[in-house]
Image: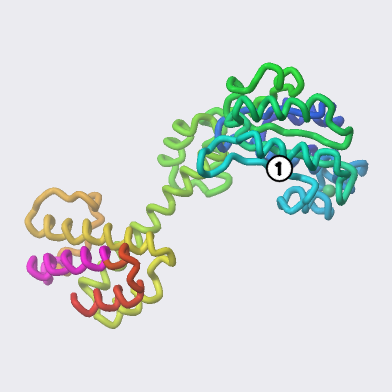
Amino acid sequence: MREIFPAIIGNENIKKLFSEGIPAHAYIIEGPAGSGKHTIARQLCASMVCENRTSENHPLPCGTCPSCRKILGNISVDCLTISGSTKSGSIGVESVRSIRQSLYIAPNDGDRKFYIIEDAHKMTEQAQNALLLSLEEPPSFVSFFLLCESSQQILETIKSRAPVIKTELFSPGFIADHLERKFGSGDREKIAQISKICGGSLGRAESLYDSDREESRLRRCAVSFCETLLFGKKSEAAVFASSQMPQQRNDVAEVLRLSRFIVRDIIAYKKNEELIFFNEGEMYPRESVKRITVRKLLAAEDSLTKAEDDITANCAVNTVLISLVMHI
Ligand SMILES: [Zn+2]
């Protein structure tokens, strides 16, 4: 059997609906952020221009022919994306008028042209009315895909010309399986937690998992940095500072901020007080901690605060880090 829309996960209803072609000129694709609206829209566009669309030996769209690659890589001049202004967030009438100006111009590459309107629910009423003119009698080679989180704010007159299709929301079990397949089953507890709070959206689940991994990456970096900074040789700490720190300025500032928590925890550990940063059993070896004085730790905390301020104030990252290492 030929594979249809291979890049769309789940959403069997949508795959079935469009397996024989895209009958209407316009569709509203409704679903929460990260639920695959963009992927679905681009897969539908590609399926109409795919050079292998009549070949049973290829998936539809094939994803490898030049036409598919242009549409899926968002570099096709025949597939235009309209989004809201970053300033107001809404899509005004000017954006929609620009559609009308290009609407009757024949496609460049193939025989189809597409308009993808992102956040279509952010179109002003005036913009929606202007769009209606284009939706009423579009040229036969044009298709519209209106993406939105909720179609409630979209005028009934538009909905009567553009059927609403809803993206599938997945069960926590399905999402957990997906995350495990994609990222490995390393952190089952985290995966279970994210699969319950992502609102059924796979994209949101992935970005939550990713940002969590990013956070633990910076945390691990801070633990290693403090280890060389406080217990290692200056030369080792200098090498770490210039080769192991994150690339982004914000991330370096975050590592320094976390390092301050670590220093405070070491002080607390020496005083047998409760730890904030470290979980049980994560603290550096007791012998190393014994060797460092509270006075040195307090000075380290000050130096870390100053370095963090300097990084935030746009000073050269490497200079700040080397100066930090030398002062501890
Ligand atoms: Zn193709």
Is residue 140 among the parts visible in the rendering? yes
Q: Is residue 300 magenta?
A: yes
For mark 1, does the 10 Å Cα neighbourhood hold few (<14), some (14 to 19), or many (20 or more) residues? some
Which residue is depicted at the point 31% across and 65% down? 313
Q: Is residue 311 magenta?
A: no
Asked whether mark 1 and ligand 1 are closer than 8 Å, the reply comes as: no
Q: Is residue 85 left or right of residue 237?
A: right
Q: Position of residue 68 (x, y in %)?
A: 80, 49
Front residue of 186 and 29: 29
Picture quadrant where residue 318 is located: bottom left
Q: In this view, does 154 lie to the left or right of 320?
A: right
* Residue reaching furthest to the right: 54
Q: Position of residue 34 (x, y in %)?
A: 57, 38
Which residue is depicted at the point 46% across and 40% down? 191
Q: Position of residue 67 (x, y in %)?
A: 83, 51
Badge 1 marks a residue whose secondary structure is: loop
Q: Is residue 324 left or right of residue 266?
A: right
Number of numbered tags placed on the structure image? 1
Which residue is depicted at the point 76% across and 45% down? 79
Considering the whole magenta stretch, tell me its main secondary structure: helix
Q: In this view, does 79 lie to the left or right of 249?
A: right
Identify the coloring.
Answer: rainbow
From which residue to which does the magenta span run?
A: 289-309
Check the image and report above or below for 140 versus 67. Answer: above
Front residue of 200 and 172: 200
Check the image and report above or below for 232 versus 162. Answer: below
Q: Which residue position holds label 1?
A: 7
* Residue reaching furthest to the bottom: 235
